[in-house]
Image: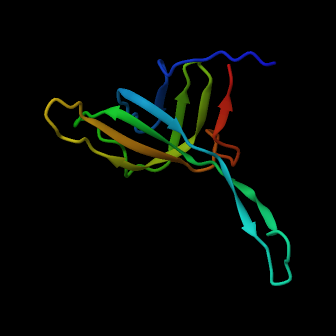
Amino acid sequence: MAVITPDLGYGATVAFATTTFSAALRSVTIGDKTREVIDVSHLATVTNKLKLVGDLVDVGSFDAEFIWDSGKIPPISAVAEVITVTLPDSSTIIGQGAVTSYGGPNLAIEDLQVGTLTVTWNGLNSAGNGAGPVVAVV
């Protein structure tokens, strides 16, 4: 049986290489990698649907929640850049991506102003080839 070492999220960081955007993170949610499943059933199919699994992997995205700072707006207009997500155990996810959406804070009495952002990976690693993002386990 494998031994699992549980960890909390403390110490996780996200670094943007070109825009140098930074924020006080409250959470980071790493999205799924997926492959398309194509239904190839036809009129002569009688028992089960027939499916073909696509060849290409969609490397997905990640979402982050951060403490809002009006002086640090997420770089929504920037081109893709190298982004490094460092996990609490010091392993990393490094690839090229860009902020594809962000949301501003809810302005309410006695409520911490937080923003959200989504970074979409473009499928390239930090060297610019189609092998990314790359997970490096320490």
Place residue 31 in its image quadrant: top right
Measuring 47% from the left and 47% from the top, which residue is drawn there?
98
Measuring 39% from the left and 28% from the top, which residue is drawn there?
25
Residue 16 in sight: no
33 on left or right of 104: right
96 on left or right of 135: left
Percent position of residue 135, x then y: 66, 32
Q: Residue furthest bottom?
A: 43
100 on left or right of 39: left
Q: Residue furthest left?
A: 109
Percent position of residue 56, x then y: 72, 57
Percent position of residue 67, x then y: 30, 31
Nearer to me, 53 or 79: 53
Nearer to me, 13 or 103: 103
Q: Is residue 1 above or below residue 79?
A: above
Nearer to me, 125 or 7: 7
In which quadrant will I find the C terminus? Answer: top right
Q: Is residue 97 above or below residue 4?
A: below
